[in-house]
Amino acid sequence: MLRYVALRLLQGILVIFLVSVATFVIMHLAPGNPVDIMVGEAQVTQEQIDAIMRKWGFDRPLHEQYLTWLSNIVRGDFGQSVIRTGTPVSQMLQEAAPATVQLNILALSLAVMIAIPAGIFAATKRNSPFDFATMIGSTLGVALPNYWVGLMLIILFSLNLGWLPPFGATTWQGYVLPVAVLALGEMAVLARMSRGATMEVLNQDYVTTARAKGLTGRAVLVRHVVRNALLPVVTMLGYRLAFVLSGTIVVETIFAWPGIGRLFIDSVYRLDYQVVQAIVLVLSTLVVVGNLLTDLTYAYIDPRIRIR
């Protein structure tokens, strides 16, 4: 078990390293220069520009800049923002992280509480009106992009009806639309997965045997069906973490949400290398850890699985 966890951690570290290298190279290949954005329309001499380049290390080769950044990361130093001069990147992340964490927790919790029971019930009532409605709703949820759904909800509930604010997180009403957009996409995937997994388990021989022993339908469902049907759903939950995080970037931009996603987009536009690299590193680490926890949870739910 420990050997498996150690191996997965090493694989995760390699993935994070490769992602950081790719992000570093792509950001430096992007058109524009952060120094130009920093200077703006101010009248500066070439000597002053060269001094700024030397201060931030932009005059050094790319590999030296990356190694310097990597050595600082190992020591727990994310550096300072190029645009917000003097502001530590770690402080910017601490300011933006709570809004993103709250948004994701609410969206995932809502999706799990609604989608998984709905998928299981739809499987037990196959070809019923509820089953058809669930599948139509999940198909629409998968097919419709979240940025389009977000804009339509703003037009309907903010502009036309005036019930909810179109942006901001100052009141609880501001949470409704972004949480709904994120939850709808996740509910669509989880409902389809839980329905398919439940239908597969219902056709197994041990379920037929349990029914033949005289167990009630509720007992069969709770004791034998649900636990085995949750295996692929739990696996999907861990892998969906990456999609939720990427979707948060779009949703936070649409609703002007003061989270990591909006900070990431603003930093990309302003070529704030330190902030972009730190956010990508943090999100990559969360995805790797999420996948590892998913594998361990999978083994815990199904005692037949032994990780070696």
Image (cartoon, rainbow, N blue to C red):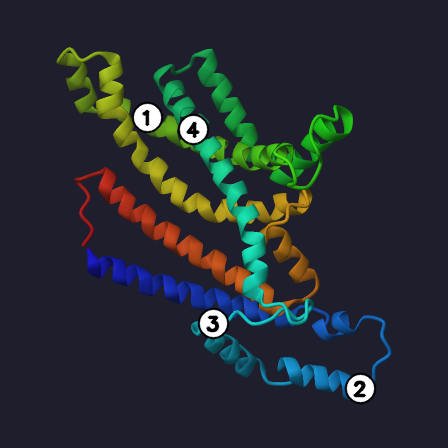
Going from the N terminus, do you reach mark 1 or mark 2 first?
Answer: 2
- Relative to residue 306, is residue 203 depicted above or below? above
Instruction: Estimate the spatial distance between the alpha carbons at disc 4 and disc 3, rounded to whole Å.
Output: 38 Å
Name the spot of residue 291 as percent of width and height, x first. 36, 50
- Residue 73: mark: 3
Going from the N terminus, do you reach mark 4 or mark 3 first?
Answer: 3
| Contact? badges 2 and 4 (CB < 8 Å) | no
Name the spot of residue 75 as percent of width and height, x first. 44, 74
Q: Residue furthest left?
A: 213
**Quadrant in which the N terminus is drawn:** bottom left
Q: Secondary structure at mark 4?
A: helix
In the rendered structure, which amino acid carries the disc numbered 1?
Thr
Instruction: Estimate the spatial distance between the alpha carbons at disc 2 and disc 4, rounded to whole Å.
Output: 60 Å
Identify which residue is drawn at 43% across, 12% down.
128
Q: Quickly name the residue at label 2.
A: 46
- Residue 168: mark: none
